[in-house]
Amino acid sequence: MSKIVISGYYGFANAGDEAMLTAIVKSLRKAEESVDLTVISGNPHNTSTKHLVNSIHRFAPWEIYSALANCDLLLSGGGSLLQDVTSKKSLLYYLAIIWLGKLMNKKVMLYAHGIGPIRSNVLRKITQMVCNQVDLITVRDTDSLDELRRLGVTDTKIKLTADAVLTLAQADKVQGFKSLQNFNLRKDKPIVAISVRNWGSDDKYLQEMAKAADMLSEQKAVQIALLPLQYPADVVACKKLQQFMNAEAVILDTAFDTEQFLSIVGCFDLLIGMRLHALVFAAVMGTPFIALSYDPKIDGFVKEVEGTNIGAIENFAASDLVKAAEKILEQDNPSNERLEQLRQKALENTQLAFGLLKR
């Protein structure tokens, strides 16, 4: 029985990170049913209950040391852990866990990472040093691959795969429709969902988004649903957007699990999203999406799936967003062969992880 420790941004009610953990756990258990999994989390009880894994607190050093001492493999990821835009401390934290794993002579893999931006020269040097010690790095997009090369990480350690969440199976939409009906959203009218988060010091992007939503509601007679991905933090941004709008908009003000999110997103006719994993959920469910970018990881994902990106959150125009939305709403949703290719690439993450254990 393999013993694996997983380190990431887990236990913080972020739908994207929780979906990544769901995907990683399912994939590992599919490869080895009896695998022993321990997840480092901000909320061990919640993580243990939701994912049926062992879980220890991210600030319990002795427990982390003990878990690493008894494991066969440390997985760091997935997601955007190695960046210093949101926090320099968090970057150092994740690097410290990786470094500790190598100090203890454990196999260490960075699993489906999104790398950067790392702006501090000192932190770039530290990241290079630590990453060059690990056994294997898989990255979810070409931008992350390029960033590792710029950092000076040994190329032979790196493999381009895809976001772990893409391995999840499509969810049944029945439960999603039931959830939407609880918010008085109807099946007989198109539903456009918008996923936003707080960003920057002003609300100009929300005001522009409100203009676009009003235009879509009036011109295309769509229902507008506001979808918080990090609950309840994103509810604040959704309420601001709702207040800026003249048209009616419904906030899906509930904490959903990964399966529920997928089911709900599958019921939308279009998703307009800032949150990366709102876009990933849409991709998994075959729901058309338009991305609004606040971070290079958004650009990286949209480029990989050959999707629609309306541009940077700071300077997009409501008219451009409406034009792109109308075009999508007026066409049949074509099958995306690129997504199936990426799903197969995402499945390689687990194959490579177990391959490390055989070395």
Image (cartoon, grey):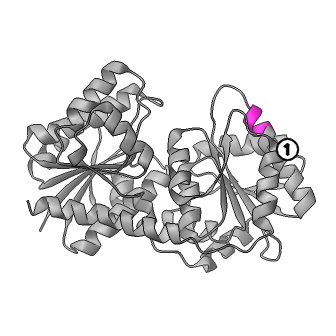
The residue closer to the viewer here, 204 or 59, is 204
Residue at 63 percent of width and 37 percent of height: 198
Residue at 42 percent of width and 24 percent of height: 119
Q: Position of residue 31 (x, y in %)?
A: 24, 73
Is 263 colored magenta in this rendering?
no
Q: How dense is the environment of label 1, judged by Cα within 10 Å: few (below 14), some, or many (20 and up)?
A: many
Label 1: which secondary element = helix
In the picture shown, does residue 38 fall above or below 332? above
Magenta stretch, main secondary structure, is helix
Is there any visible trace of residue 2 in the rendered image? Answer: yes
246 on left or right of 97 = right
Residue at 53 percent of width and 59 percent of height: 305
Q: Position of residue 108 (x, y in %)?
A: 18, 48
The residue closer to the viewer here, 142 or 208, is 142
In the picture shown, does residue 264 fall above or below 206? below
In the picture shown, does residue 287 fall above or below 68? below
Q: Position of residue 9 (x, y in %)?
A: 39, 45
Residue 38, quarter of picture: bottom left
Span shown in magenta = 203-207
What residue is pinned by disc 1?
211
Quarter of the rendering occupied by the N terminus: bottom left
The residue closer to the viewer here, 28 or 329, is 329
Q: Position of residue 23 (x, y in %)?
A: 39, 64
Q: What amino acid type is highlighted by mark number 1?
A: Lys
282 on left or right of 248 = left
Quarter of the rendering occupied by the C terminus: bottom left
